[in-house]
Amino acid sequence: MDTRNKAQVRRFVRIPYRLYANHPQWVPPLFGDVELLLNRDKHPYYEFASADFFIVVSDGRDVGRIGAAGESHSTSTQDASSVVLSL
């Protein structure tokens, strides 16, 4: 998904709103907060990390979403990297 494409970002953000709309325990996040997490120009996370986001489609319908993020940390005594997967 291209995070600079507003239509694709909206599509990505709306998926759980549709999937969990009738679930009594689901508390939706604020739409704007999720959009900010995807904004590579405004969110400070992207200063030291990268991420890719994907929309899962089955039979022409959006059925899920996933994000994969990788961080790079470097200090004078240690080098480390990690990957985070999120649904």
Image (tube, rainbow, N blue to C red):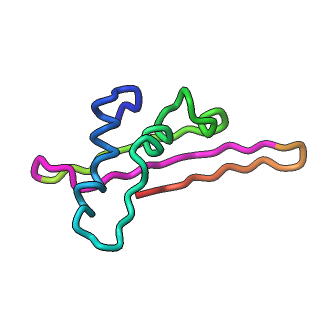
Residue drawn at (63%, 52%), measured in percent from left and top? Answer: 82
Determine the residue positioned at 52% across, 31% down.
Answer: 40
> Residue lying farthest bottom?
24
Quadrant of the image containing the N terminus: top left
Locate residue 79 relative to residue 31 in the image: left or right: right
Q: Main secondary structure of the magenta part?
A: strand
The x and y percentages for residue 44 are: 63, 36
Q: Quadrant of residue 28?
A: bottom left
The C terminus: image quadrant: bottom left
Q: Is residue 28 left or right of residue 45?
A: left
Q: How many marks?
A: 0
Query: What's the residue at 54%, 54% (across, down)?
Result: 84
Q: Which residue ends up furthest to the left in the rendered image?
A: 59
Q: Position of residue 20 (x, y in %)?
A: 27, 63
Q: Is residue 60 magenta?
A: yes
What residue sits 32% from the left and 43% below the top? 12
Residue in the foreground of this view, choosing between 33 and 51: 33
Identify the image quadrant of residue 2.
top left
Q: Magenta region: which residues?
A: 59-74
Q: Say if the magenta span includes residue 66.
A: yes
> Dividing the picture into quarters, in which one does residue 31 lie?
top left
Image x and y of residue 5, in percent? 34, 27
77 horizontally vs 50: left or right: right
Q: Nearer the viewer, residue 30 or 6?
A: 30
